[in-house]
Image (cartoon, helix red, strand yellow):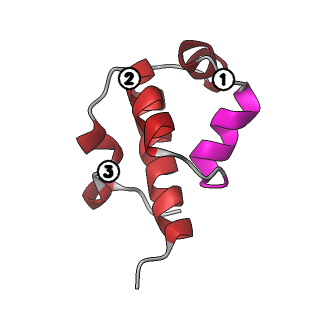
Amino acid sequence: MINYVDILKKIGLNFRGERIKQGLSQEKFAELANVHTNYIGKVERGEQNLTVKKIIDLANSLEISEEKVFDFSKVLRQ
C-alpha cells in the first residue's frame, strides 16, 4: 500500500539533496521559488502536502526535471 506521507518525505529529501548539491540555502531556494523559508523547511521534512503544480514550480526554481524529484532510487535514508 502506498503511504502518501512516505512519498512526501522522499520528495522532500530529493528537493533538499538538489538544493544542497547546488550550494543553495533554504532562504535562497525560497527566494527562487517565491515562497516563505518555512514552507521550504516543511517541504524538505515531508510535512507539506504538495500539489502537482507546486512540485513543478519548485523543480523549475531549481532547474531540475520532475524525474529527479520522483527518483526514489537514490533517496538517502533518514
Q: Residue at x 31, y 58 (%)?
A: 72
Query: Where's the N terminus, which quadrant?
Result: bottom left
Compared with 72, 17 (above or below) is above
User: Residue 11: x percent and y percent?
Assistant: 45, 51
Q: Secondary structure at mark 2?
A: helix
Which of 16 and 50 lies nearest the eye of the viewer? 50
Q: Is residue 50 above or below residue 65?
A: below
Binning the other alpha carbons within 10 Å of mark 1 as few (below 14), some (14 to 19) or many (20 upward) gives few
Mark positioned earlier in the residue sequence (1 or 3): 1
| Residue corresponding to mark 2 | 60
Q: Is residue 45 magenta?
A: yes
Residue 18 drawn at (x, y percent): 40, 33
At label 1, which amino acid type do we have? Val
Point out residue 27 in the picture as x, y percentages from the top left corner: 67, 19
In the image, what residue occupies the spot 45% across and 27% down? Answer: 57
Q: Residue at x 35, y 43 (%)?
A: 69
Which of disc 2 and disc 3 is earlier in sequence?
2
Looking at the rendering, which quadrant does residue 22 occupy? top left
Camera-nearest residue between 71 and 17: 71
Residue 7 % position (x, y): 46, 63
Cα–Cα span, label 1 and label 3: 21 Å
> In front here: 2 or 76?
2
Q: Which circle marks residue 35 in the picture?
A: 1
What's the magenta region?
Answer: 37-47
Tag on residue 23? none
Tag 2 or tag 1, which sits nearer the N-term?
A: 1
